[in-house]
Amino acid sequence: MTIVKKELRTYLISFLVWSAGVGGLMAMCVWMYPAFAGSMEDISALFAGMGDFSAAFGMDKLAFGSIMGFYGTECGNILGLGGAFFAAITGMSLLAGEEGGHTAEFLLTHPLGRTRIAGEKLAALAAMILGLNLVCLACGAGSILGIGEEAEWGDLLRFHTAVLLMQLEIGGMCFGLSSLLRRSSFGLALGLVVLLYALGLFINLDSGLEPLRFLTPYYYADAARVFDQGLEAGPVLAGCALGLGSAALGLRRYGGKDVAA
């Protein structure tokens, strides 16, 4: 577990900043809810009648005037994008960063196999994504309790589970991509997240694009869909397969890669 501990120490500041930032924004949103509670019915009706804009963000399905609808819309987007950005950037830098930072020659002189090195880096990535989501769940649930609201805790846990799986999938995809690169590409990582997010919006707008639901984790992690239908097995399993397959590609590729000093 030497590499795991080393990576956790290396990314500790980044983990703390992202966790505090995403969790803090979620808590702020929830604490704002009582200030708007009196006019929420009017706001909910307004959002529900905004046509394609409402459909894209699921506001035609969520009761924005309720704490769950408000949480799914506001906090769901904060966690869905913020957490995914963290997973993508971290996953992209774990392998390629060794070559880009010219530390590969030092790391690979240790009596550890390449597969073990990459495997422990992958384990560190999963641990950081899990940790961030636990912090965000605590911030979200704690804030709901703090303002005296009653949430549907089963739906809330299912939603956070879906978002966790989504971030693990994106992290696995970027980990696999990083094994193909000589240096980290944060632009590629962020671009991948934006592309998957946009694809999820397009599927909400046009039901004809629904076959593409297996390509983006933002489909099964959409709060409106989770609260209404729960977790849909097909897209979840497809996402898990894509994330695990990408991670396995990264392990295999790094094991036989001609690593530049």
Image (cartoon, helix red, strand yellow):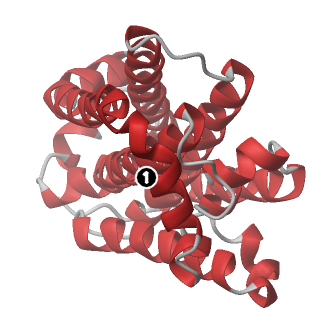
In the rendered view, would you say 64 is above or below 184? above
For the question of whether residue 221 can be seen, the reply is no
Left or right: 215 as drawn, with respect to 184: right
SS at badge 1: helix
For the question of whether residue 56 can be seen, the reply is yes
For the C terminus, the quadrant is: bottom left
Q: Pick whichever, 96 or 159, lies toward us.
A: 159
Q: Pick whichever, 189 or 31, lies toward us.
A: 31
Q: Residues within 10 Å of mark 1 (few under 14, many from 20)?
A: some
The residue to which callout 1 is attached is 77
Q: Pick whichever, 221 or 9, lies toward us.
A: 221
Q: Residue at x 37, y 33 (%)?
A: 33
Q: Residue at x 51, y 78 (%)?
A: 53
Quadrant in the rendering for residue 208: bottom right
Q: Position of residue 250 (x, y in %)?
A: 52, 56
Q: Residue at x 30, y 53 (%)?
A: 89
Q: Residue at x 74, y 79 (%)?
A: 212
Q: Position of residue 236 (x, y in %)?
A: 77, 51
Quadrant in the rendering for residue 241: bottom right
For the N terminus, the quadrant is: top left
Left or right: 251 as drawn, with respect to 43: right
Q: Three-letter amino acid code at disc 1?
A: Asn
Q: Position of residue 228 (x, y in %)?
A: 79, 47
